[in-house]
Image (cartoon, rainbow, N blue to C red):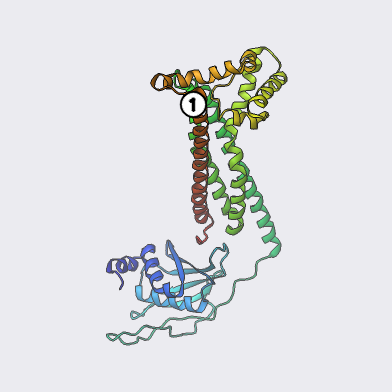
Amino acid sequence: MVNSNILDLARQGDPEAIAKLMNQSLRAKQITVVVSTIDDCLTILASGAEPPSRTFLLNFVREGMAKLKIDRIRRVRIRAFKKGEKAPSWQEVVVLDRGSSHTSNGASSIDSNGDRPISQAPITPPVRVSKSTKPAKDSAKTTKTTSPPKPNPFFDRIKAFLFACLFVIVLIISIGLAVGCRIFTAILAENYLYKVEILGDLLRGLETGELLNILVFAILGMGVGVATALVPKPIGHRIGAAVLIVALPIIFSLGSFIRYQGWIDTVSLEESITRDRAVQMTSDHLEKHVGNSGFFGFYLYTAQYPILPTRTAEMQEASEVKDLVNSRITNSIEKVASVEPKTVSTLFSICIWSIRFFYFVVSVVTAIFHFYQGEALADKLAKRVPS
């Protein structure tokens, strides 16, 4: 049963109310419509698993508009889609005849590329009959519909190529913005957040700066999602997902990579040696303690030792390194309970890996959520039916 408020709104030309009435009637045929209005034109985007039947949908719309009698609507533009496709399978414009007839609203069908009715042959569209009413004569005028002219393949290919290039450019810009924000947040954390007195070492150990990844991956996901407006949605969705899968772990690891480079620069400055010599010194230290050198060794090392040694003496004496690492964090714990430094180091390592995993999951969820938000915005920009 139709809500009277919705029916009243539909008669006033409210597109949402019209869409609700149509979707309720078309539900059995698994057809979904989206309705919008611009001036005196009502636009209907209809989609289904297969493109809706032209004859059925035209008759359905004519009958419905004749019943609603919306004064300000003069034309109805119908576009039929197969779900997931950007281009309509067919489209048609129905011009509503506001002549002298008061019993029903006549209508004539025209092709979407012209304003002149193709013919004026009168037909009688299907009318629902109830016990309280009798079938009424309908003065609607309709014609045989014709398909739109075939597009030029050459220009279509050029257009598709240009949009594909723009798609790639937008992807590159989105990734560039995300990388720039990631570098900025990492430097901000290293130079300010981790320099806070007393709490700085603890915040560095817990890698608190990684919380700023929410902003970084929101930008990445939204940018990649919006870019799909430039290409067919199925293709854009697959490429966008592939870009996120590749770019996300790389961008996520940039914070640790910047910290690694900063550590090498600090060793070079503290020991007054060349950067190449500092790279060799830090690599030897990492190899000795975690069995790996370079950035990967640094990533493993910082999961066990939150404080990085910056002098040769600290790197040569393992006991001094342990004292340096544990003294700032374990002293407060040992005052409360007798806990071995090795146990504290193991617990700390488990804690850090858990926190890193949590930060990574948050980054993934943020990127995926904003990717779908970007695709929804792309649907509106490209004026395509959401799948």
Figure quadrant of residue 9: bottom left
Frontmost residue, 72 versus 351: 351
The relative height of residue 86 versus residue 149 in the rendered view (above or below) is above
Is residue 72 visible in the rendered structure shown here? no
Q: Is residue 6 above or below residue 378?
A: below
**In the picture, residue 318 is in which quadrant?**
top right
Q: Nearer the viewer, residue 257 or 169?
A: 257
- Taking the spot 68% from the left edge, 24% from the top edge, the residue there is 283
Where residue 243 appears, x then y in whole percent?
Answer: 61, 47
Examine the rendered structure and indicate whether residue 299 appears above or below residue 56.
above
Element at label 1: helix
Q: Nearer the viewer, residue 109 or 363?
A: 363
In the rendered image, is residue 301 in sight? yes
Coordinates of residue 79 in the picture (x, y in percent): 51, 68
Residue type pointed to by label 1? Val
Kindly identify which residue carries mark 1.
344
Q: Quadrant of the N terminus?
A: bottom left
The answer to whether 103 is drawn above or below residue 186 in the figure is below
Count of numbered circles in the view: 1
Residue 69 percent coordinates (x, y) = 35, 73
